Image (cartoon, rainbow, N blue to C red):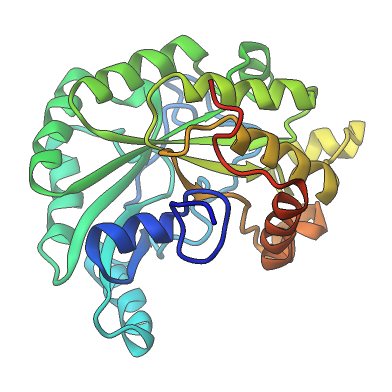
Amino acid sequence: MFKNTLDNKRYYTLNYYYKKKYNSKVFKVSLNAGFTCPNKDEKLGTKGCIFCSKLGSGDFAGEKTKDLVTQFEEVKSIMLKKWPNAKYIGYFQANTNTYAPVDVLKEKFEPILKLDNVVGLNIATRSDAIDDEVLDYLEELNRKTDLTIELGLQSMHDETLKYINRGHDLKSFEDCLKKLKERCIKVVVHIINGLPNETKEMMIETAEHLNNLGIDGIKIHMLHVIKNTELANIYERERFHILTKEEYIDIVINQLERLNENIVINRITGDPVKEDLIEPTWLLKKFCVLNDIDKEMVRRNTYQGIKAK
């Protein structure tokens, strides 16, 4: 059995990380703080990344018309029924959650930290939305709670970043990551498999590159085409290749093999909204994908880190 797991998985699960740290069930409560994005509000552009939904990749976050404490308590009330002794992470998920003055950030983050059994914050953002003043505040937050910054990268390849209208390059990401790590702030990086024009080798290279940058965790997503996005328009015109489930599983396993065993795998597949999904429909069967990854790793007799450099 791989050592960093509770359930015979062959990679370092987030469930194991939290259980080991808190000896308790820990939930991330997704919140929508009403932030926007520099890639949507004309600072960098107006269209955002080509795959981004109207909710700014926060499809399962709270309803932004409600205040954050209400959003939090609504989710917590459901979890309490099954896990009355659970602890919670406030997850600021939708759009770019450091893209505001520090006084605004404090108004959003601080009330969640005061709620019962909240042990930390996860803040999803972009490398071009963390200036030095925000860094100072994040360092302050890091001293008083379990803080994790989730940085979107998607791919290490600048040609891909340009194609998907990311709005920044690899160097911007690396510079931001270095500053966060210098302040001992944990960083989880988001990547996407199956982006147009990327080969299997390019996707594996992204994982290998991140492995050498000292990241604490990673979220691996499968590209999914959803309605009312620029990606949907491109797919309608070009019908670019969508990875099959088997191709995706093969790529993920190759990526896991190249990630150090101490990198926490926060996510290994996506959760598309069924009504909005165009392709791939196999992604709707999340637990089948997870189980098939486990089975294939057993068949190959492989595990996270076996090929890490």
- Seen at 67% across and 26% down, the residue is 204
Give the percent coordinates (x, y) of residue 36.
40, 39
Count the marks: how many? 0
Instruction: Give the side of residue 41 with respect to residue 307, left or right.
Output: left
Assign the N terminus to one quadrant of the image. bottom right
The image quarter containing residue 165 is top right
Instruction: Give the side of residue 140 with respect to residue 192, left or right.
Output: left
Give the percent coordinates (x, y) of residue 236.
88, 39
Instruction: Give the side of residue 252 with respect to residue 267, left or right.
Output: right
Foreground residue among 91 and 104: 91
Foreground residue among 204 and 121: 204
- Seen at 36% across and 54% down, the residue is 17
Foreground residue among 82 and 93: 82
- Seen at 69% across and 34% down, the residue is 254
Q: Is residue 25 visible?
A: yes
Q: Is residue 255 above or below residue 213?
A: below
Q: Is residue 275 visible?
A: no
Q: Is residue 53 above or below residue 66?
A: above
Q: Is residue 162 above or below residue 100?
A: above
Quick one: which residue is furthest to the bottom in this view? 81
Give the percent coordinates (x, y) of residue 75.
36, 75
The image quarter containing residue 81 is bottom left
Give the percent coordinates (x, y) of residue 168.
49, 16
